[in-house]
Amino acid sequence: MDLPQIESVASPRSRDSLPPWRDDAAWLAGGTWLFSEPQPALRSLVDLSAMAWPDLEPSASGLRIAATCTIAALEAFRSPADWPAAGLFGQCANALLGSFKIWNMATVGGNVCLSLPAAPMLALTVALDGVAWLWQPDGGERFLPMADFTVGPQRNSLRPGELLRAIDLPASGLRRRAALRQASLTTLGRSAALLIATLDESGGFALTITASTIRPMHLAWDSPPSSDELDARIQALLAETWFDDVHGTPAWRRHMTRRLAAKLHQELLA
Amino acid sequence: MNVAMDADSLATLKFGIGQPVPRKEDPTLLQGQGRYTDDISLSGQLYAVIVRSQVAHGRILSIDTETAAAMPGVLGVYTGADLVAAGFGLMPKGLAFKNRDGSDMAKPDQLPLTTDFVRYVGDPVAFVVAETQMQARDAAEAVMVDIDPLPAVTEPALAVEPGAPQLYPNVPNNLILDYHYGDAEGVAKAMSAAAHVTKLRIRNNRIVVAQMEPRSAIGEYDPATDRWTLRLGCQGVFGMRQMLSSVLGAKTGNIHVLTGHVGGSFGMKASLYPEYLCALHAGRALGKPVKWTDERSDSFLSDSHGRDHDFTAELALDEDGKFLALRLNGFGNVGAVMSNSTPQPSTLNAVKNSIGVYRTPLLEVNTKIVFTNTTPVGPYRGAGRPEANYYMERLIDTAAAEMGIDRIELRRRNHIAADAFPYRTPSGNDYDSGDFPALLDHALALADWDNFSTRRTESRKRGKLRGLGVGQYLEVTAPPGAEMGGIRFEPDGAVTIITGTLDYGQGHATPFAQVLSNQLGVPFDKIRLIQGDSDQLIAGGGTGGSKSIITSGGAIIEASGLVIDKGKKIAAHVLEAAEIDIEFSGGRFNIAGTDRGIGIMELAAKLREGMQLPPDMPTTLDVAHIYKGAPSSFPNGCHVAEVEIDPDTGETEVVRYSMVNDFGVVINPLLVEGQAHGGIVQGIGQALRERVVYDEDGQLMTGSFMDYCLPRAVDAPSFAFDAHSVPARTNLLGAKGCGEAGCAGALPSVMNAVVDALSEFGIRHIDMPATPEAVWAAIAAART
């Protein structure tokens, strides 16, 4: 839909030309959410598409994913053979449940910054130890582990005026074996639980829980936990951790999380 | 032997009654050549977009249209006040019912577009007309509606509480109707004296209709003739014209309603909606045709929803398990605005259909019909019939479990016997035919009921629970009403049937042609159908309540008789014989006892050529007849569902499904089976998947197919289908309506199967939809 109350749209081509931050402004990337419902508080948009950031920058140290990288571009990425965890890209793109039209417009940064509990790009980047590269309005920058990026449903650690420039996925994360499990109340419905488990060569095991929790929960072990240890960690999560909406009650989500975690554990450690 | 006659006979057999003839329209529709309303583009056509309320309840403070009106391409921005000023009247008030104290039900005045309060999310408050769809959409977003929000209420039980938000000032406690039917004293005595009373609180979940074709309309007005024209998808143009007449304040002769292909309705498109009136108003105001087509997101809000009943059901039984009385107490949620069928589904149709196939001496139904701040609820595939059958069938399975009686045996003990017809039920229906015990046995055999334990054991080896459920239904269908039977012999040699039922996916053209071909011997391929042009109709009850083959079929039969009467007169002249000596058979008028005759098509051709006839002789074979209609029919059947449940996730899968139906005389078994399939899948959807959810503020939480789960092909197994037909005695064809039966059988059979699978946990009832979460929660609760 149109946002008729928008008074100005800036299209900066570089960081130097970013306009001063306004509280009634929003960063515009793909716009698939921004234009999906009225935004009565907004008067200004800053369109990031003209920044022309490279979508994906693989290097020896890992993969840099621009905030403006579309889901389609991420899904189409052909990873090096020693990055098995890159197989998650397609799985997480599918977990978005978007049509190809959405894939072609929606961005990784947009999905992450919206910070919905079921955001699959959050699950992906947290699971692979991603680090957010943030531009600050005073010209500075900071780096934030993706595990700390989201603090609750549609709430995150971005400060006013901060811009997510990119997310760096370290090569160590991409070299892990990984597996994903998803549960929904309905066939091809919204995720009620979305879990990713990873296992590195030294036996380090990590489980990232999203969709069933109000924010991504990243549980890690230096050596593979037993199934009981894994389950105990999940059960130890606070009751208020579990998300409640029309797609599932906290009790059912918790149960499904335990079940999916057990299956992931079995798959990676069998 | 006459070779030509032999070919005709073969054709008659091929397209005769009982033959599985594919639908005439299939090639057109399957090649994308259907002509739905939105496919029509008229010269100079403009486009309308509706502005809807984004809050569930509130007072309209202002509607600022100034900005929108100044936007490019915009030709008009209208509000409810504009429609009032233009002379548009109140929306139709639907059916009239009495409260239990004899007073009239509440019927608040409702304008096409509200001017004072909004009462649900999606309530239309204004509309914009522009040269293009996009311009209209852009401008609609610029219409500023200032609403002072008020508290909302979405649950009927809460809406009737003192202090609840009030939707209409003259409807205290939001109670439209306090409905009562039955012998309350007798039922109370039976309940208190019964050896056992089974009591269940049963929720019939609200669902979205989700037809494939969104609603669409094109409104026009011709000032030269003072004539309105409305093109739209609906369920009957004759009835729609009547409803329009009351709002427009125009004579029906000044209103022309046209309907082409319709992509599904299930009851929903029967109502008159505000958007149609908006298109007409703008069409007159701007002097050009104005098209409006809904978007799917708006359909979730603005198309009437289905079901949404909340009943406490009680069944009293004696020590032998014989039914003594049935009582239903509950609510019917009709949303914020009356539809044309309000409040029938949870009142009269609960009365008529809850008894089903069982001898039950006493019945009482008490329903509070309540306004809430939700989308209006209208008829949906069965409109109270599947709900009522569901209550009874759930009660029976529960009673059987509570009394330790086999659930099939309990049904057998209470069946209305095959020799009991005509049978008057406590609801006042006179069943004319059926063989319920034998039909049950037939269904059990088809479902391989006796070997279920083997399949259950096999499922258990895979860690799955397996359940088996039966749903034996009877629906009171085909509400009586007049219908047109028009037959016209066209200049090009075709024969046109004109009737006022309306096909919105059923395939009427084919079985109607089969009936006409059977009656007159007219070649099937020469037969056309006109159904969607109000100017062609002299009567028309529309389609709904599984009535079309009975009403239009009966109308065609009677009209055919009139064609034959006329034809005999003309044939007698042509054949130089006495009229009394003319017989009609196999499409030919013959002189009795001779081989001299003339075929009906040949006779029609001679008439077209201007054959000279005596002064008192009919000059055509054409007939425009009004059939007075037939009593209701009572289709019935037994569906057997088998489910597998993963106890760890609650995921439920329907793995086998069998059905035996009594649809009386079946005109076209291919189409009938298709109707059953569709109804069953909708039933499975309601039973296992679908639910409309509002939050406490009245916002729709399930407003897209991402949030609202329609059943998919993978959710249904292949169906075993068989018939156990007993011809109806109440109509000319002997047919019984089939359109809604799939839902009626699916809801109870699937849910009884689910409960059967869960019975080892002591679970006696679970409400629809049995989502994985609901099933898992029931198991978890039972385990603790």
Image (cartoon, helix red, strand yellow):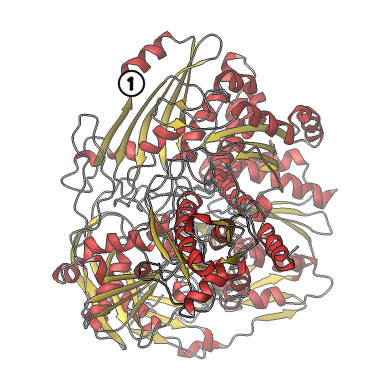
What's the amino acid at mark 1?
Answer: Asp
Q: Position of residue B675 (x, y in %)?
A: 58, 52
Does residue B433 appear anywhere in the picture? yes
Q: Nearer the viewer, residue A15 or B580?
A: B580
Q: Nearer the viewer, residue A82 or A78?
A: A78
Left or right placement of residue B743 versus residue B326 in this view: right
Q: Position of residue A38 (x, y in %)?
A: 37, 70
Number of marks present in the image shown: 1
Residue at coordinates 34% horizontally, 46% vertically from top-left?
A: B334
Left or right placement of residue B454 versus residue B487 in this view: right
Quarter of the image where one finds residue B67: bottom left
The residue positioned farthest toward the left in the image shown: B85
Does residue B784 appear anywhere in the picture? no
> In the rendered view of the protein, which quadrant contains the C terminus of chain B?
top right
> In the rendered view of the protein, which quadrant contains the N terminus of chain B?
bottom right
Quarter of the image where one finds residue B54: bottom left
Where is mark 1, residue-wise?
A: B183
Rendered position, B333 above or below B133:
above
Q: Nearer the viewer, residue B540 or B462?
A: B540
Could you classify mark 1 by the number of other residues whose Cα lies within 10 Å: few (under 14), some (14-19), or many (20 or more)?
A: some
Q: Position of residue B190 (x, y in %)?
A: 40, 13
Left or right placement of residue B105 versus residue B22 in this view: left
Q: Chain ID for label 1?
A: B
Rendered position, A68 above or below A202:
below
Q: Position of residue A116 (x, y in %)?
A: 52, 60
Mark 1 secondary-structure assignment: loop
Residue at coordinates 58% horizontally, 68% vertically from top-left?
A: B25
Q: Nearer the viewer, residue B172 or B598?
A: B598
Rendered position, B743 above or below B624:
above
